[in-house]
Amino acid sequence: MSAGGAASGDRTAAASPPPDLGPPTTFVLLRHGATALTAHGRFSGSGAREDPPLADAGRAQAAAVATYLRGTPVDTVVSSPLRRCRETAAALGLPYAVEEDLRETDFGTWEGLTFTEARAQDPDAFAAWLAVPGAAPPGGESFADVAVRVAAARDRLLAAHRGRTVLLVSHVTPLKTLLRLALGAPHTALFRMDLAPASLSALAVWGDGNTTVRYLNNTAHLPPG
């Protein structure tokens, strides 16, 4: 082949369009509305003896997000099994499925405590939990454990709903974990994101596996206070 022919071939290859990845799978991430424990900043995970319902403020938040999302194309709603998420999902007025692996972290012996109380009770364990992904609260679940099950749930939902919009109703740690994984960020990113009760975030997963975060902690729909 002549030098000119090779150059022509290079130009042809360079001009080839990228492969058609099709529409992304969009995950809309909805944190549940507030409970009585939310207002006091207490650990409320899957290891708690009680499964608290939405407080009055949480029900108002769920109604507000339902109004905000009305008319938004959503193909599937999937909820954590915990009551506050199921009540938030029900307020949307759409059928929903339950995914066990979207449940909140098991906080072990820290369930019901504030951060300050947990730190005072187990200072060394608390420091390790903040610093090391594999460290867990006594009798509880580590961030690394949560990431494994949340990623597995994400992958199952991707396989079942590729190219569609899936609304996930879950909790702070699972939703932050999905966002962290999308960004390829370390576990310390969990402490650098704020997800308010009934806030909305979204990410898009493309056919080649690339993931983009579209927005984070949207609270424009929520009533004041």
Image (cartoon, rainbow, N blue to C red):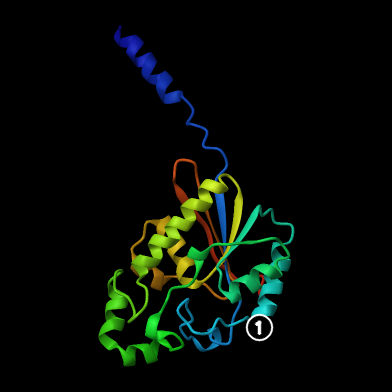
Q: Which of the 4 image quadrants contains residue 11?
A: top left
Q: Which of the 4 image quadrants contains residue 182?
A: bottom left
Quarter of the picture containing the N terminus is top left
Image mark count: 1
Which residue is depicted at the point 38% across and 15% down? 9
Q: Name the residue at the left extreme.
A: 124
Q: Name the residue at the top extreme.
A: 1
The three-letter code of the residue at mark 1 reads Ala
Q: Position of residue 108 (x, y in %)?
A: 39, 81
- Residue 97 visible in the snapshot: yes
Task: Decide which of 33, 97 is in the foreground and name it.
Answer: 97
Local packing at callout 1 (Cα closer than 10 Å; few below 14, some 14-19, many 20+) is: some
Q: Position of residue 2 (x, y in %)?
A: 30, 7
Q: Name the residue at the front extreme.
A: 49
Considering only vertical position in the picture, is 174 above or below 203? below
Quarter of the picture containing the C terminus is bottom right
Element on which disc 1 rests: helix
Q: Which of the 4 image quadrants contains residue 116?
A: bottom left
- Residue 223 visible in the snapshot: no
Task: Decide which of 138, 74 is in the foreground and name it.
Answer: 138
Considering only vertical position in the picture, is 39 above or below 156? below
Q: Position of residue 87 (x, y in %)?
A: 65, 73
Q: Position of residue 166 (x, y in %)?
A: 60, 55
Which residue is depicted at the point 70% across and 66% down? 92
Which residue is depicted at the point 69% across and 69% down? 90
Which residue is depicted at the point 65% across and 68% down? 89
The residue wearing badge 1 is 57
Task: Decide which of 196, 136 is in the foreground and name it.
Answer: 136
Q: Is residue 42 left or right of residue 34?
A: left
